[in-house]
Amino acid sequence: MRKTFTTQPPLLIPPEVYEHAALRALDEVERLIDWSRIEPLLPGGEGRRATGRPGYPALTLFRALLLGQWYDLSDVKLSAQLARDLLFRKFCRLEMDQGVPDDTTLGRYRTALGGRLEACLDMVVTMLEDRHVIIAEGRVAIVDATVIEAAQSRVAHADPEAGSRVKLDTKGRMRAVWGYQAFVNADEDGFVRRVKLSPGNEAEVDHLEKLVVGDEAALYADSAYIGPRTRALLKRHAIADQVQRRGARGHPLSAEGRARNVEIGVTRGRVEPIFGHWKRYWGLRRSRFMGLARTGVQLLLTAIGWNLWKGARFRRLYG
């Protein structure tokens, strides 16, 4: 047995404390979408069957994992924070006289989410479109990738499912990183529609077809995505080609081509703040987990959390 999320009683604390401004920090995220439409997409809550206690509602565990992404917490630290933080308890509907999920429960639930998170991301995008937070008409696809270092990147214990990728470090020097590539399809406002993960040594263009939804007005991407497959994909979906060009040996890019790249780069660059925020504040510079599947779940949770966080901010700024 497990309790449902909607039947959880309120926190057992005085109203004057419950209404403190610090406990309203996530109210806009709470009101942003209809969470009941997410619940059927989730696996059931993980219960403490050994002790006979009712299991945790699916949305309680799902929201807890979102908090872990937003506040860059390991499962151990997340469980501790759920126990002592009133804001966390309020968001997850955990009463003061109730226990909290431990780190193994949180880890098992993350694994159980597996193949369900893409549907959750689609549902969040759909609800944000319904509420006119995301503008669907005339939107474009801005596609790019960033490197996530593997949880274990040393040669002797390296994650076997990752791969080597050359990237610029903070000092502008090229260095090889053992890890994964996180691909994103975002719109002009920075909302994420699709994400994919691959080992770091795979070509970016190989994953373009999985990223494009097909209803976009144009594709903005860097020169890593040029080629006949890209042109065929864009022609098939009637998507305008805004992919940057590059010159070849003996055939440098013309002044017109360079100017076109600069113009495209203004729009294409809007994906960079997404990667910057994810890495600086949400811990995505390096994977917390071993393996493609677990790191993929981390990426999808980050994308869902980003859309909710950004959507709440949009509502606050623009109504």
Image (spheres, grey):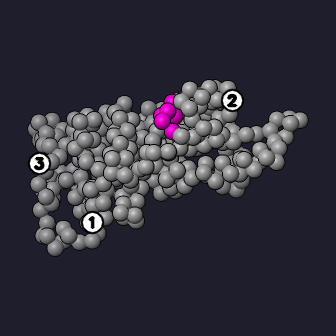
Determine whether, in the image, residue 26 is placed left or right of residue 176: left
Q: Earlier in the sequence, mark 1 or mark 2?
A: 1
Secondary structure found at label 2:
loop
Instruction: Examine the rendering and report whether any part of residue 130 can be seen.
Output: yes
At 51% from the left and 30% from the top, the residue drawn is 210
Camera-side mark, 1 or 2: 2
- In the rendered image, residue 127, in percent from the top left (x then y), is placed at 32, 45
Is 288 within the magenta? Answer: no
**What's the distance in space between the residues labelled 1 and 3, CA to CA?**
20 Å
Q: Earlier in the sequence, mark 2 or mark 3?
A: 3
Q: Answer few, some or many: residues within 10 Å of disc 3's Cα (few below 14, many 20 plus, some between 14 and 19).
A: few
Which image quarter is the C terminus in?
A: bottom left
Is 212 within the magenta? Answer: yes
Residue position for label 3: 7
162 shown above or below 24 = above
**What's the distance in space between the residues labelled 2 and 3, CA to CA?**
54 Å
In depth, the one of 104 and 234 nearer the eye is 234
- Disc 1 residue type (three-letter): Arg
Specify the label residue 24 is tagged with: 1
In depth, the one of 37 and 200 nearer the eye is 37
- Disc 3 residue type (three-letter): Thr
At 38% from the left and 40% from the top, the residue drawn is 121
Query: Tags 2 and 3 in contact by the CB under 8 Å rule?
Result: no
Which image quarter is the N terminus in?
A: top left
At 64% from the left and 53% from the top, the residue drawn is 266
- Disc 2 residue type (three-letter): Gly
Q: Earlier in the sequence, mark 1 or mark 3?
A: 3
Region in magenta: 208-216
Residue position for label 2: 227
At 46% from the left and 49% from the top, the residue drawn is 191
